[in-house]
Image: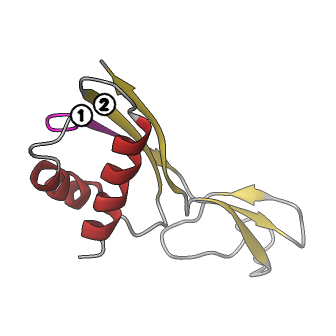
Amino acid sequence: MHELPITQNILQIALRHAGDAKRITRINLVIGDLSAVIGDSVQFYWDIISKGTIAEGATLHFERIRACFHCNDCENAFEPDGRKFECPQCGSDQVNLVSGREFQLESIEVE
């Protein structure tokens, strides 16, 4: 359910930055695998809330960013295996998230 306010914010940002455009044709979003944002839900709400705006019918393009961690002990960079976040090289749990929590509107395309 948290996708509704997220989608409303995406629409507000897109409309604000569209300027004098006749129509918004595409919105490019970046979503990290660990962001807990579900693309299908964003699309569902988008189809409803964009009606009657210059963004109605715009394509939402989702670029997924894989989760990546950095091990503080052995300096290894790795993608997690499921929900296991230990370093596969040394077994340490002293890791930092490098990518995977992103969620941003990267760009819009207009006519």
Q: Quadrant of residue 80?
A: bottom right
Pick the quarter of the image with the C terminus.
Answer: top left
Mark 2 lies on residue = 26
**Nearer the observer, 26 or 23:** 23
Magenta part of the chain: 55-63
At which x and y percent is residue 95? 76, 74
**Nearer the observer, 8 or 64:** 8
* Secondary structure state at the residue bearing disc 1: strand
Mark 1 lies on residue = 59
At which x and y percent is residue 18? 38, 33
Q: Of the residues under marks 1 and 2, which one precedes in the sequence? A: 2
At which x and y percent is residue 99? 64, 57
Dot 2, how many residues are within 10 Å of its Cα: few (below 14), some (14-19), or many (20+)? some
At which x and y percent is residue 10? 36, 53
**Nearer the observer, 88 or 22:** 22
Up/down of 72 relative to 40, above or below: below
Q: Callout 1, which amino acid?
A: Thr
Up/down of 59 relative to 65, above or below: above
Asked if the stretch drawn in magenta spans residue 58, the answer is: yes
| Residue occupying image coordinates x 20% and y 35% | 54
* Secondary structure state at the residue bearing disc 2: strand
- Left or right, 58 with respect to 51, comes to right
Q: Callout 2, which amino acid?
A: Arg
